[in-house]
Image: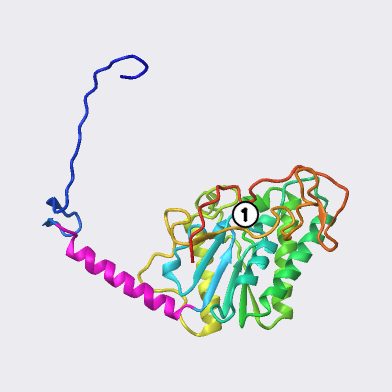
Amino acid sequence: MIDGKEIMAKGRVNFYYRGQPYFCKNCQEPHHEKCPQQIVKQALEKQGESIRLQKTQSLLIGDSNLRRVNEKAFYTKTDCATGAKIGHVANTLDFVKKEESKIVICHVGQNNITHDDEVSMEDWSQQTQNEVKSLKEKLSKFETAVIVGVPPAPWCKKNKRTGEMRKKINNAFKALAHDNMNIKYVDIEQEDEDDEGNWEDERHMTEKFTGYVLGKIAGKMQEITGDPFCIKNIPWTAERKYSKVRPTYRYGCEVCSQIGCHDNCTNETTIVNPSTSTSTGKTAKKRGNCSGSDESEPKKR
């Protein structure tokens, strides 16, 4: 009975009970309980994961372009913060223990590139320089750091201005690697013209390009440690977004990335001088999610 109206409907109800016989598609045999082959497989996977974690002494941290990484294919932990800028990652590194992560790999910078013409290049450059400086300070406590260059996403190639922003960020990263022996730089460029195959949208890498970037990182890590960074026979990427990484929050103001600057970065006053934490007097609408994708629920460590 719905809203006083009575209707006739046909349907089917399935009843399931413990020990119910079924045909297993994995081993092509009938079972009453869990497939023995599946039990063995899960036990081996659990054992392999335990060994992986014991050998893992690095952290891969960055923005939502890490969302298709399969963490279990590498000797690293992977933290993915949707919309994270350089400053957000720097803030988060305060909570990373150097004893647990001897090497930190940062994939960040794309969310610092804005299409907002109301933000002057002078203000943008000042904020970016301060965020890079903060990142340098936070990376100094680790034995080694690897910074991955901003990839050539369509978002970065929108116009001459965005292209210049990407160039400035990557040059700043290269300068860090040049001036600091514990920091290494990995350059990322697109080696083909297959934009459709490399980019899911104007910001995010496909599994194909994610695999390419991971290959560059794996090469640099083997160069640093002398040991393999990836685990054999395990796919590097995940078909389901965020399913094989640890989603986290970006820590700090969404606009300027500073902690405790809410008085300056309101809905109408978003352009702040990062060096003094004071408003420049210019106003613009507060930008939304920098990554262009929905945030996923964070996983517990």
> Which residue is at a point 72% across and 63% down the rendered structure image?
169
Callout 1 crowding tier (Cα within 10 Å): few <14, some 14–19, many ≥20:
many
Q: Can residue 77 be seen? A: yes
**Residue in the foreground of this view, choosing between 180 and 206:** 180
Residue 188's x, y, as percent? 60, 65
The image quadrant where one finds the N terminus is: top left
Q: Residue extending furthest top? A: 5
Q: Mark 1 points at which residue?
A: 83
Q: Residue extending furthest bottom? A: 226
Left or right: residue 23 compared with residue 50: left
Looking at the rendered structure, the kind of residue marked 1 is Gly
Give the residues drawn in magenta, as a range: 33-56
> Magenta span has 44?
yes
> Which residue is at a point 49% across and 66% down the rendered structure image?
301
**Residue in the foreground of this view, choosing between 165 and 63:** 63
Q: Is mark 1 on a helix, strand or loop?
A: loop
Q: In this view, does 231 lie above or below 259?
A: below
> Magenta span has 159?
no
**Residue in the foreground of this view, choosing between 11 and 209:** 11
Residue 156's x, y, as percent? 67, 53
Q: Can residue 186 be seen? A: no
